[in-house]
Image (cartoon, coloured by chain):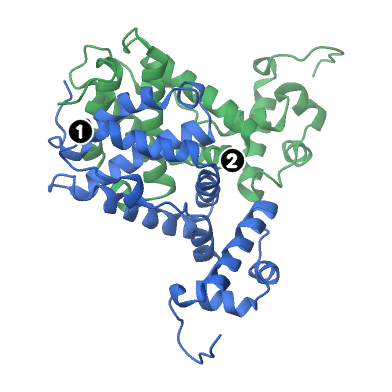
Chain colours: A green, B blue
């Protein structure tokens, strides 16, 4: 490492292998000990770096938590080709979201671990909702109607969150055991309603 | 207390003041120490009863947790008069759900405390989802279409859970700061779709 006497470099400027080592160590120790009992010092020790370096690159434990546990998916790949003109847009969207969560177990475990921490730690909740809402806006922003676009996207994010919670965390059998196609067929039209329907319009 | 030498009496058969003292002590100690560090012994001590009595009435800590923290609302009062013929049924339903959560702070705090525990403790999650799904079925069962009734109700429960999570736990501003009327106007038609719409039908 070159010596830096002042200023915090952007996380991206860390040497990639150092960054990866820190994030891997963080994931392991969060999984072993839970969030509360994980210390920056323990992560540093596991990663073979100085604790000050972690603070230097990632700031607080809250920031590191979200960075380590946010699912590492490529939204451009998952949602490739979706536009407001895609037939059955909502159903396709829900199918792709659920398929990723269903099949990519390591990423799902990260996401649920992050959610579990967020519900009891407000600073993590704040960073997590910023990340996920930003992702939803990135994916859906162009497809949502102009009026109240952010509310439309927030309603979709809320509904998807509820489905993921019921399926993968609380495990309500009616949701947890349903086929993805069944769920997508029901939830998809609702997503379209939120994206492009008139505000507050009745669903017929 | 009369002496019982065998069998576990129904919780309801506990003397009401003993039962209340135990539940009050449990709520206080959960709030003070968190779920992990709360012991049946500490609850017993606070309530002035023997720990064996708590086990006798409530069984495990998981069962006592749900019993102590489930919101104490009267669904018959909250949802009085709602039928499948109520104009704007979904909007009225969402308005009433959100109004209770918004205004009855002690009950909301119980519900969010229970949710926080459930996301990290599967046995509590199981009891919680059974309780809430039972409540949803009690309130909505008569209004949902016959086909896939339980799936319809589970989808509604999932969506409401997502909205409550975003508004009161993760505090996404678009949901947390919205008027109840605005949210109910958007979410209500979706609830009606889930209740009575054709399965998988597109929303126009």
| Front tag of 2 and 1 | 1
- Tell which subunit mark 2 falls on: A
Query: Is residue A44 toward the left or the right of residue B121 in the image?
Result: right
- Farthest residue toward the right? A5
Q: Quadrant of residue A9?
A: top right
Would residue A112 be visible to someone looking at this image? Answer: yes
Q: Position of residue A146 (x, y in %)?
A: 34, 7
* Discs 2 and 1 lie in a common subunit: no
Q: For the C terminus of chain A, which image quadrant?
A: top left
Bin the neighbour count of mark 1 within 10 Å (Cα to Cα): few under 14, some 14-19, many 20 and up. many
Q: Residue at x 55, y 75 (%)?
A: B55
Say which residue label 1 marks: B193
Q: Quadrant of residue A140?
A: top left
Query: Is residue A189 toward the left or the right of residue A127 in the image?
Result: left
Q: Residue at x 67, y 38 (%)?
A: A25
Q: Position of residue B181 (x, y in %)?
A: 37, 25
Identify the element where label 1 is drawn.
helix
Residue A117 is tagged as: 2
Identify the element where label 2 is drawn.
helix
Q: Position of residue A133 (x, y in %)?
A: 47, 22
Question: Which sits in the foreground, A47 or A81?
Answer: A81
Q: For the N terminus of chain A, which image quadrant?
A: top right
Q: Residue at x 51, y 44 (%)?
A: B108
The reply to whether callout 2 and callout 1 are in contact (CB within 8 Å) is no
Q: Position of residue A88 (x, y in %)?
A: 19, 22
Residue A112 is tagged as: none
Question: Which sits in the foreground, B167 or B129?
Answer: B167
- Tell which subunit mark 1 falls on: B
Separation of disc 2 and disc 1 at Cα? 33 Å
């Amino acid at each position: 490492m070159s010596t830096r006497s002042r200023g915090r470099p952007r996380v991206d400027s860390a040497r990639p292998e150092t960054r990866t080592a820190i994030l891997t160590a963080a994931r392991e120790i969060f999984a072993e000990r839970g969030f509360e009992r994980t210390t920056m010092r323990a992560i540093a020790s596991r990663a073979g770096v100085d604790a000050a370096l972690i603070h230097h690159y990632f700031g607080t434990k809250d920031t590191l938590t979200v960075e380590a546990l946010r699912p590492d998916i490529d939204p451009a790949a998952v949602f490739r080709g979706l536009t407001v003109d895609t037939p059955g847009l909502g159903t396709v969207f829900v199918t792709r979201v659920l398929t990723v969560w269903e099949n990519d177990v390591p990423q799902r475990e990260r996401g649920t671990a992050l959610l579990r921490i967020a519900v009891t730690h407000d600073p993590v909740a704040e960073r997590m909702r910023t990340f996920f809402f930003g992702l939803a806006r990135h994916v859906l922003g162009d497809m949502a109607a102009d009026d109240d676009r952010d509310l439309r996207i927030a309603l979709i994010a809320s509904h998807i969150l509820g489905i993921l919670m019921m399926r993968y965390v609380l495990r309500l059998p009616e949701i947890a055991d349903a086929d993805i196609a069944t769920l997508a067929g029901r939830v998809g039209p609702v997503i379209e309603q939120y994206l492009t329907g008139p505000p507050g319009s009745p669903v017929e």
